[in-house]
Amino acid sequence: MRMSSGLTFKSTKGSWIRNLRRQSSCRSVEFFVPSSPPLDPEKVKELQRFITLSKKLLVMTGAGISTESGIPDYRSEKVGLYARTDQRPIQHGDFVRSAPIRQQYWARNFVGWPQFSSHQPNPAHWALSNWEKLGKLHWLVTQNVDALHTKAGSQRLTELHGCMHR
């Protein structure tokens, strides 16, 4: 779900109200965000009700959460890295078998690090961090290595693939 305009959730008891609209320092972000149909207002209300009634949410995220921060995913039609370039990730087997491939991997990471590490959390990252602070989010699991959940303040977090800054 795109969250560029922010989300506001209210509990029936009024104990938590958050407008999660934040500015991010993204450049040409729309280039990486795949097109999507308009949100169905009834589905948004259903999600709001679910979150309001939930006591302990477990949330799992992947590359799609960071596209609005300017980090492209791999597979999105027309805007993902696979659609725009012939570059592919280095496979684990190749990495462990070949010193030149490891050197290529680390050289590519070194060259790209300043730009990659400059990305900032977007409203979705801030929303999850706020839900954690409010006691709604019990745990967050991500496949991402971009540290944007950490930059947004999330602490109850498992980074399945590690993190590029550590």
Image (cartoon, helix red, strand yellow):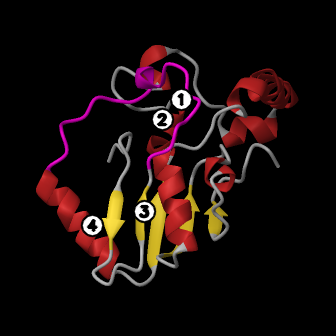
Labels 3, 2: front one: 3
Query: What residue does disc 4 label?
Result: 48
Label 1, secondary structure: give it. Answer: loop
Q: Nearer the viewer, mark 4 or mark 3?
A: 3
Q: In the drawing, does residue 125 fall left or right of residue 107?
A: left
Circle 1: is it few (<14), some (14-19), or many (20+) Cα within 10 Å? Answer: many
Mark 1–mark 2 CB contact (< 8 Å): yes
Contact (Cβ within 8 Å) of mark 4 with mark 1: no
Q: Which residue is mark 2?
A: 67
Magenta segment main secondary structure: loop
Crowding around mark 4 (Cα neighbors within 10 Å: few <14, some 14 to 19, many 20+) is some
Q: Amino acid at mark 2?
A: Thr
Marks 4 and 3 sit apart, C-alpha to C-alpha, by 12 Å
Q: Secondary structure at mark 4?
A: helix
Q: Position of residue 109 (x, y in %)?
A: 77, 29
Q: Residue at x 79, y 44 (%)?
A: 165
Q: Which residues are magenta?
A: 21-40
- Residue ID for mark 3: 18
Instruction: Decide: is 159 above or below 79.
Output: below
* First in residue order: circle 4 vs circle 3: 3
Distance (Cα) linking label 3 and label 2: 23 Å
Looking at numbered disc 3 in the image, what kind of residue is underneath it? Arg
Q: Judge the density around disc 2: few (<14), some (14-19), many (≥20) Cα neighbours within 10 Å.
A: many
**Dot placed on the residue nearer the N-terminal end, 3 or 1:** 3
Q: CA distance from mark 3 to mark 1?
A: 24 Å
Q: Residue at x 63, y 71 (%)?
A: 156
- The quarter of the picture where residue 48 lies is bottom left
47, above or below 31, in the image: below
Whole-percent x, y for residue 6 in the image: 38, 48
Q: Can you tell which quarter of the image residue 90 is in?
A: top right
